[in-house]
Image: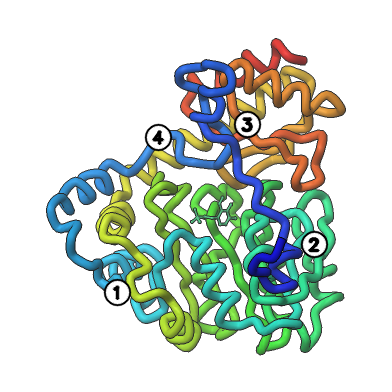
Amino acid sequence: MKEPKPTSWIRKIPPYVPGMSKDSITERYGIADPIKLASNENALGPSPKAVEAMEDVGLRMHLYPDPEAVGLRTSAAAFFRCRPEQIIAGNGSDEIIDLLCRAYLEPGDEVMIPNCTFSYYRIASLVCGADVLSTSMRDNAIWIDDILGKVSAKTKIIFIANPNNPTGTCLNRDDIMKLVSGIPAETLLVIDEAYAAFVRRKDFIRATDLISEHGNVAAAYTLSKSHGLAGVRIGFCIAAESIIRTLNRIKPPFNMNILALKAGEAALKDEEFLARTLEITWQGLDYLYEQIERLGLSYIPSQTNFVLIKIGGRCREVFEGLLKRGIITRSMTSFGLDEYLRVTVGLPWENEAFIEALSGLL
Ligand SMILES: Cc1ncc(COP(=O)(O)O)c(C=O)c1O
């Protein structure tokens, strides 16, 4: 049959594999309210200040939102300790990743991506016709020396998730400084800090602290995790003004809807919510570590709000067994980690329900 054909490079793109939704499990197993520990969402729900701000929008929904997102960017500048001119807001950090690729990649350009990381970097790069070069992991972490060994003048963008999804590991200050100083000044280093708020390691460095001295570093951040706003879609790029000006030239004029603008502005000021989020996440992680060890399993210590648990050869069966008991975790098959499950930290009762179900399946 004759039909319109997408470009040859678009046809090569593998589809994004999302976590399973609560509704799909309700439909499949008739479980009224499954526990979702699959997509690294915030266990507490949304920031209450954000909810209040969205309710206030009320009857103003017929008006176009502010295309420059001034209120949101001002709030973000205080949060990231930079100037509003160094920030652009996006419809989730997914849109930020897209904008960076569209602005800096031409067909045939090279992009370097660690081979076990957030899959959207690859998709967004392939959309632009770029060639993706995978770099190896070492001890489940991003391996700086492999990136430095492969980088060349041809490398247009390097993507790093710090901390990394799905391994939960993070690079420290020395690693990041070694990377920044070892790459060409024309190579854009995107450091995605979706989970940076959760890091407990003291030797961690925020990419936002590097942007004034390094014009080729772009930090990405999202309010989906730390601020509980995954469904509202709010992300940021924090970088040198010249990069932000470039992204502003190509962003859709009204990329941030009015609810996202107001929710994000309020959430960033909600220090109490962030503090409670960190407390419940860290307590939950410690509980999970203790219980995983008690069950004789191992895990990769995490600097995020999720943990990779090594289940072993029966992993698929355990994953399905958990689904039948109404607990959604994330299968790691699409990442090539067949023996692992990724589990987001939930509320204490959700973590306990997960452990109970898991121990019944081992
Ligand atoms: C490392 C990383 N970056 C970006 C995102 C996307 O975030 P957003 O919801 O802001 O698009 C995710 C989502 O899981 C992620 O894990």
Q: Nearer the viewer, residue 85 or 11?
A: 11
Q: Which residue in the structure is indicated by mark 2?
A: 143
**Which of the pair 329/28 is nearer the observer?**
28
**Where residue 188 sits in the image (x, y, percent)?**
63, 80
Q: Pick whichever of labels 2 and 4 is earlier in the sequence.
A: 4
Query: Which badge, 4 or 3, is on the more N-terminal residue?
Result: 4
Q: Residues within 10 Å of mark 4 (few under 14, many from 20)?
A: some
Q: Which residue is mark 3?
A: 329
Which of the two discs, 2 and 1, sits closer to the camera?
1
Kind of residue at badge 4: Leu
Q: Quadrant of residue 264?
A: bottom left
* Percent coordinates x, y for residue 201 in the rendering: 60, 51
Residue sticking out furthest to the left: 59
* Label drawn at residue 44: 4
Cα separation, mark 4 vs mark 1, equals 30 Å
**Left or right: where 130 falls relative to 327:** right
Which of pointers 4 and 1 lies earlier in the amino acid sequence? Answer: 4
**Which quarter of the rendering shows the C terminus?**
top right
Q: Residue at the far front: name it.
A: 1
In the displayed structure, would residue 138 be above or below residue 342? below
